[in-house]
Amino acid sequence: MQMLKSIWVQWKRLERYVSTAQIFGKRMYEDQIVTLVPGLAAYLNKIHVDCAAFIYKKAEGMNFMENFNTRMMEEVGKPLVELELTSVETAFMLAQMSWQVAGKELQGDVLKASESEQETLANELHIYYIEELRLPNYASRLIKIMNIINAAQKIHFERQSFMDLVRIFDFFRVHVSDPEIYKAYF
């Protein structure tokens, strides 16, 4: 359960951007579109969330949240569209990110398992590139995939730091059943 708690928010965001890139292509970043749930998408620059019900202090810089969405679109969305990932690459990217995050956050036995799983993932991706795609020189493609993972993680951790400040200064009135699982979200 600890691993799920540590990765679900990042997984959800990255998977959402991957699916948006596959569905909308260049329109994703040109029109600032992102899928919210399967079958429902929104224009990021036109969506409005009424926060009056859960923000009860004037939060200077709450529009800072929009900056995270803009960065995700530029640093994650646009490269995803340009790469046109295969389903195997998408699975690799999500699994790689999950094991990186879980290993860093949970340490100990999870870190050991994480290192082993990441090695297995790398070997399987190598075989996929060589045998199935017949792409012996895939280094630049793999670097781009890793850059997407790193950008998504960096944005997530910066957003998480911002949300920690929001919680410290008590800007939100959100009460959830399991605060630990939503720590990175609210």
Image: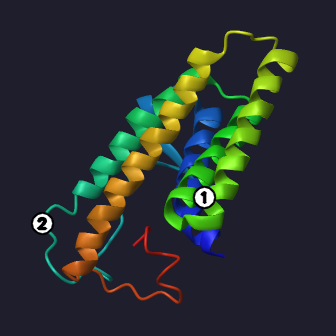
Q: Amino acid at mark 1?
A: Leu
Q: Is residue 133 above or below residue 51?
A: above
Residue that appears at 34% across and 42% down: 70
> Along the line of sight, which residue is nearer the eye, 176 or 66?
176
> Along the line of sight, which residue is nearer the eye, 65 or 2?
2
Horizontal side of residue 107 vs 129, given as left or right = left
Question: Pointer 1 and pointer 2: residues touching (CB < 8 Å)?
Answer: no
Q: Secondary structure under badge 2?
A: loop
Residue 12 appears in the rendering: no
Q: Secondary structure under badge 1?
A: helix
**Which residue, given by chain and number where applicable, does mark 2 sit on?**
60
The CA span between labels 1 and 2 is 38 Å
**Quadrant, the N terminus:** bottom right
Could you tell me residue 104's position as x and y percent? Answer: 51, 57
Horizontal side of residue 113 vs 163, given as left or right = right
What is the crowding at mark 1: few (fewer than 14 residues within 10 Å), some, or many (at least 20)? some
